Image (cartoon, rainbow, N blue to C red):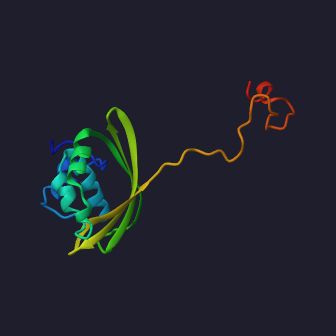
Amino acid sequence: MNADQLCPCGSQINLSGCCLPFIERRKQPETAEKLLRARYTAFTLGQVDFIIDTHHSETRGDVKRDEIEEWSRDSDWLGLKIVESKAGAATDSEGLITFCAKYELHGKIEDHWEVSQFRKEDGQWRFFDARALKQEPFKRAEPKVGRNDPCPCGSGKKQKKCCNS
């Protein structure tokens, strides 16, 4: 771990000035988003204790350490994208964050979409729960125009002899 490298969370700030102070417990994240970024960074660095310790006490019993260690160790973490934050500011008590974490596992690139719920416990942000989001396959609104169908431009010609040529 090089503290002068850019933080894996995507903030474009050096690790030492971004998530590392949280992971090393020198500072507490002021917002739910900062905790989410620090937890992502902890996954990239294999800092499983931080991931477990930042679970809310009500849900910490559901944590499977061996699964977290395996996912953290076996994945090549490629990036974090925060899509939406609802609440989660320093003055809030709860927050929801929608994000996508991109990683490579066993030679396959994956996008992990999730809505994470954060709650404050004893004044500190904690990860409470998550709901995975499935990426739905693309569905056409209208049937596909075949090569022998009339061209949708209205010319009266077949698609293959008009706009598809």
Residues 134 and 116: in front is 134
Instruction: Tell me where residue 6 appears, x and y as whole percent.
Output: 24, 44
Location of the C terminus by quadrant is top right
Q: Position of residue 12 (x, y in %)?
A: 29, 47
Q: Is residue 130 above or below residue 13?
A: below
Q: Residue at x 30, y 75 (%)?
A: 91
Looking at this view, is 60 or 12 the one in front?
60
Q: Is residue 151 above or below residue 79?
A: above
- Residue 156 picture location, percent across and down: 87, 33
Whether 1 is drawn above or below 22: the answer is above
Q: Quadrant of residue 155?
A: top right
In the displayed structure image, the side of residue 145 where residue 100 appears, left or right:
left
Q: How many marks?
A: 0
- Measuring 27% from the left and 72% from the top, which residue is drawn there? 120
Q: Is residue 162 left or right of residue 132?
A: right
Q: Position of residue 26 (x, y in %)?
A: 12, 60
Q: Residue at x 37, y 34 (%)?
A: 108
| Quarter of the rendering containing residue 49 | bottom left
- Measuring 39% from the left and 41% from the top, which residue is drawn there? 110
Q: Is residue 89 left or right of residue 45?
A: right
For the N terminus, the image quarter is top left
